[in-house]
Image: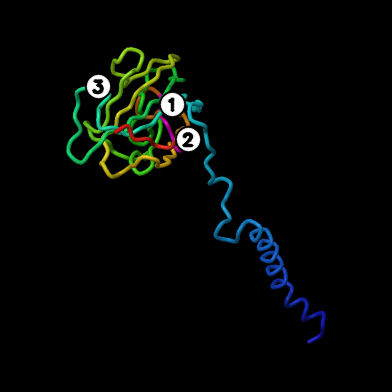
Amino acid sequence: MTLRETLRTWRPVLIVGGVLVAAGLVAIPLGGWDEVELQSAVVPEQPIGQPYAGHRMSTAIDDLYLTDEHPDGFTEPDPGTRFLVVVATLENLTDEPQGALGSKGFYSFTIPGYLELDTVLGAGDNSMRLLRDGTSGSTLSPGVPDTVQFVFVVDAGLFADGDELRIGLTDATPEEADLFDGTRWARPYVAVEVPVVLRDER
């Protein structure tokens, strides 16, 4: 076999090898293949107190704490449970009333290990009220910012003082609904994360 024929035979192998070497040179400064992370998978951070405006809601996480005393002053936790309180300022950015918390599939925010987009909450697992007057804050009118106090019933050992929780603020794509008159929210996702250090008010 001549030298020209040999090079022609090995040319595809040499090209693939060159690509892998070049990719490796990119990966090495980043810490190796295990630490290379796709940019599209990185969720941006949002400072506590700063609102994120999605298509449905503008949401800012203002406070987050554990307590054994329900903010209403009389509800007692069941044995083995505590209350996780989330204070958030929300504004309904649509033309129709919207639930402050949202619903399964598209909650206004997520809590790692407890409230994910597909979590099913029981009827007694949460409550909410408007801080301005103490009334129920389950529904928000369009264009009116309100600070809402969400109270979730959690297992006593689920969270602890000093835990960093990355609260996810969500968004989705508004589309015209096919089966009813109104908007359906397609492809919900966590748009930004708010890192908050949890405190215990025991």
Marker disc for residue 62: 1
Look at mark 3 in the image and give the residue it sits on: 72
Foreground residue, 98 or 62? 62
Give the side of residue 181 with respect to residue 195, left or right: left
Secondary structure mostly seen in magenta is strand
Residue 80: give x, y in percent of width and height. Answer: 20, 41
Q: Nearer the viewer, residue 39 or 105?
A: 39
Q: Quadrant of the C terminus?
A: top left
Residue 135, image x, y percentages: 29, 15
The furthest residue to the front: 202
Span highlighted in magenta in the image:
183-193
Within-10-Å neighbours for mark 2: few <14, some 14–19, many 20+? many
Which residue occupies 27% across, 38% down? 154
Residue mark closest to the camera, 2 vs 3: 3
- Of marks 2 and 1, which one's residue comes earlier in the chain? 1
Question: In whole angstroms, how far apart are the C-alphas of marks 2 and 1?
Answer: 10 Å
Most distant residue in the bottom direction: 1
The three-letter amino acid code for the residue at tag 2 is Val
Dividing the picture into quadrants, the one containing residue 32 is bottom right
Tell me, yes or no, whether the highlighted magenta stretch contains residue 17: no
Real-space Cα distance between discs 2 and 3?
26 Å
Q: Position of residue 41 (x, y in %)?
A: 53, 46
Residue 194's label in the rendered image is 2
Element at badge 3? loop
**Image quadrant assignment for residue 149:** top left
Q: Earlier in the sequence, mark 3 or mark 1?
A: 1
Q: Amino acid at mark 3?
A: Asp
